[in-house]
Image: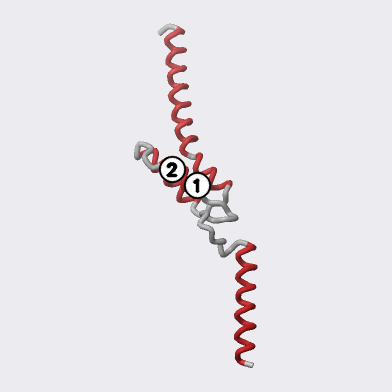
Amino acid sequence: MDVLSIFALILLIFVVLCLAYGMIIIHDIPYHIALKRQHPHADAIHVAGWVSLFTLHAIWPFLWIWATVYTPERGYGTGKVPPNSADGLAKRVTELEERLAALESRNS
């Protein structure tokens, strides 16, 4: 084999490895978004990203959506405050204090 053939073979192997690595990196994007947003299902998104590699990428757009709709402040954006947020806990404590005061005044 001459030098040019060896160089072409090495270049071909390099390109194939780069494409494989690129596919893995692209499929981890929803997982990294989920980690950044402190998503409670980040591990499930990561596993589903690997599964999407074997399902011809059919579920990958849904993983992207699933990872991006969650924010720690609003949850999934349904308008309800997540129960473990500071605002949610303060609101819940206030409601419980009001109920307790109403019960105490009714029993007195």
Can you tell which mark lies on residue 49?
Answer: 2
Q: Secondary structure at mark 1?
A: helix
In this picture, is 43 found above or below 102? above
Task: Identify the residue at image location x=42%, y=44%.
Answer: 62
Task: Identify the residue at image location x=52%, y=54%.
Answer: 77
Q: Which residue occupies the extreme bottom position in the image?
A: 108
In this picture, is 46 found above or below 100? above
The residue labelled by disc 1 is 67
Q: Pinpoint residue 22: horizontal percent, then vertical percent.
A: 48, 30
Q: Find residue 9 and report its image quarter.
A: top left
Q: How many marks?
A: 2
Left or right of 38 in this view: 4:
left
11 or 34: nearer the eye? 34
Q: Find residue 8 and report its image quarter.
A: top left
Mark 2–mark 1 distance (CA, rounded to whole Å):
11 Å
Task: Identify the residue at image location x=51%, y=49%.
Answer: 69
61 or 78: nearer the eye? 78
Q: Pinpoint residue 46: horizontal percent, then vertical percent.
A: 47, 46
Q: Pinpoint residue 40: horizontal percent, then vertical percent.
A: 52, 55
Q: Residues within 10 Å of mark 2 (few under 14, many from 20)?
A: many
Can you tell which mark lies on residue 80?
Answer: none
Q: Pinpoint residue 63: horizontal percent, then vertical percent.
A: 44, 44
Q: Secondary structure at mark 2?
A: helix
